[in-house]
Amino acid sequence: MNREAIFRERFAAILADMKGAEATSEHMAAVGGLANMFTSRAGQANWTGFKANISKTDYDAILAMMQKQGNRLAREGNTRQVRAIETLAVSLIAKTQIRDADIAADAVILDNLIDRALSAYHASTPVSPIIT
C-alpha cells in the first residue's frame, strides 16, 4: 500500500470517528483543546483560519512536533491525546492533498467538525475576570 492509500484510509477512519459515535465529548474536548493551543498562539479565531494561513515552515515543524509528541503519548498509553493529535495532523496533511477531490471535499467537513470542537472548548472554558 502506498503512502497516499494509507493516508486515504486513515483520513476516512478519522472523519468517520469525528462524525459518528466515536466522537465522544471526551474526544471532542481533546481535539478542541489541542486546536485551541494552535489557534490561540497563531492569533486565529478557528482551525480553518489557522490551517489556511500556516506557512510551509510552520506546517513542517508542527507535523514533526505532532509526530514526536504522538509517539511519546502512545508509549505512555494516552490514547485520547494521541487521537486528538492524529485528527489535527490528518487535517493539516489533507491541505496538501487537494488534487484528490474526495479528500478536498471531506477535509472541509473535518475542519468544520474541528471548528465545532474548538467552539465547544471555548464555551466550556471559564473566562478569568479582568478585575478581581
Image (cartoon, helix red, strand yellow):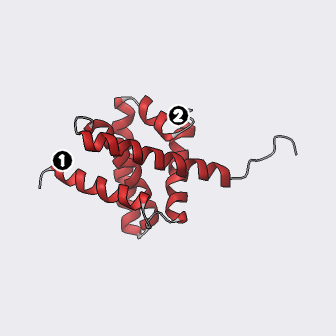
Please report the residue visible at 31 percent of the width from the left and 59 percent of the height from the top.
Answer: 13
Q: Nearer the viewer, residue 67 or 107?
A: 107
- The residue depicted at 57 percent of the width and 39 percent of the height is 40
Q: In the rendered image, which residue does mark 1 sit on?
A: 4
* The N terminus sits in image quarter: bottom left
Mark 1 or mark 2, whichever is nearer to me: 1
Asked whether the viewer can see residue 63, the reply is no
* Disc 1/disc 2 C-alpha distance (Å): 29 Å
Q: Residue furthest right?
A: 132
Residue found at x 49% / y 40%: 47
Depth check: give the residue in front, 55 or 15: 15
Question: Tag 2, which secondary structure?
Answer: helix
- As drawn, the label of residue 125 is none
Report the amino acid beneath label 1: Glu
Q: Position of residue 98 (x, y in %)?
A: 27, 36
Circle 1 Cα neighbour tier, 10 Å, few/some/many (<14 / 14–19 / ≥20): few
Q: Which residue is mark 2?
A: 42
Vertical arrangement, residue 53 with respect to residue 114, above or below: above
Residue 71 figure quarter: bottom left
Earlier sequence position, callout 1 versus callout 2? 1
Q: Does residue 55 appear in this view?
A: yes
Q: Residue furthest bottom?
A: 77
Tag 1 secondary structure: helix
The amino acid beneath tag 2 is Ala
Q: Pointers 1 and 2 in contact (CB under 8 A)?
A: no
Compared across the picture, whether 132 is left or right of 17 comes to: right
Residue at figure coordinates x 46%, y 65% from the top left: 80
Q: How far from the left and from the top, in percent, is residue 19?
A: 42, 58
> Is the residue marked by circle 2 packed among few (<14), some (14-19), or many (20+) residues within 10 Å?
some
Picture coordinates of residue 86, whole percent (x, y): 37, 55
Picture quadrant where residue 45 is located: top right
In the image, residue 68 sits, relative to residue 40, either above or below, namely: below
